[in-house]
Image (spheres, rainbow, N blue to C red):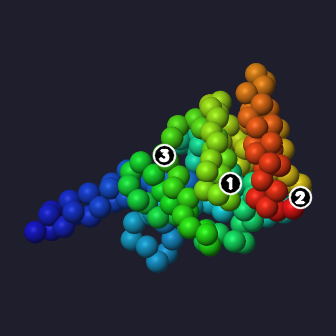
Amino acid sequence: MCVAILVALAIGALHGYLSRPLFHNQFARNDRMVFPRWICAPPAWDVHGFFAYADYDLNLIAAFPSIPVREIHPFFDDVSSRQACLHWNGGTFVLPRKESTLLVYFRDFTSLECPLAAGRAEYFREVFTRQDEVTDLLSGIEAFCDSGDGTIVRFIRRCRERLASDEPSAGK
């Protein structure tokens, strides 16, 4: 009986470790918990409150350059092992579980995506959050994620054009 209980507890702990939700980069335990759990770090944001989440293992960044962080419900629901949802006042953003990708979401629930060089998601999150008052989320992504081949620079230009073509989305 004791062995069965120990096996069940071990399986539960292992399942908790293996089923990591998106953007939950730290596996930790506190005094009120028997087993550790995945913890979601707060998003990185600029002085306007526009924000981005980073998933280190997948090398995935989900950026929201037209939605202030104060307008979202900052939690993720695991819909399945392939996606998660971020709830916002106007509805729900479905975030896919993709590797080495930069996703930029807009107020109309559409998105653009671009390949991301290895290790850039963690680098972006660590460096961006150490900066004093980053004035523009997209400029921060461009500065900390570009791998030198111009892919991110061209992609950020497309995102800026998209924001400019939809003035209410740009918050103007």
The C terminus, quarter of image: bottom right
Q: Nearer the viewer, residue 86 or 164?
A: 164
User: Which element is circle 2 on?
Assistant: loop
Among the two numbered marks 3 and 1 on one chain, the one whose residue lies closer to the N terminus: 3
Q: Are marks 3 and 2 in contact (CB under 8 Å)?
A: no
Among the two numbered marks 3 and 2 on one chain, the one whose residue lies closer to the N terminus: 3
Rendering coords of residue 21 (x, y %):
47, 56
Mark linked to residue 133: 2
Q: Residue furthest left?
A: 1
Q: Is residue 87 left or right of residue 105?
A: left
Locate residue 169: give its quadrant. Answer: bottom right
User: Which element is circle 1 on?
Assistant: loop
Q: Is residue 126 left or right of residue 74?
A: right
Q: Return the residue at label 1.
A: 106
Mark linked to residue 97: 3
Q: Nearer the viewer, residue 168 or 61?
A: 168
Rendering coords of residue 45 (x, y %):
77, 59
Q: Are marks 2 and 1 in contact (CB under 8 Å)?
A: no
Q: Give the CA distance from mark 3 to mark 1.
A: 18 Å
Residue type marked 2: Glu
- The residue shown at (56%, 54%) is 23
Rendering coords of residue 147 (x, y %):
74, 27
Q: Give the CA distance from mark 2 to mark 1.
A: 22 Å
The N terminus, quarter of image: bottom left
Residue type marked 3: Arg
Q: Residues within 10 Å of mark 1 (few under 14, many from 20)?
A: many
Residue type marked 1: Phe
- The residue shown at (62%, 72%) is 89
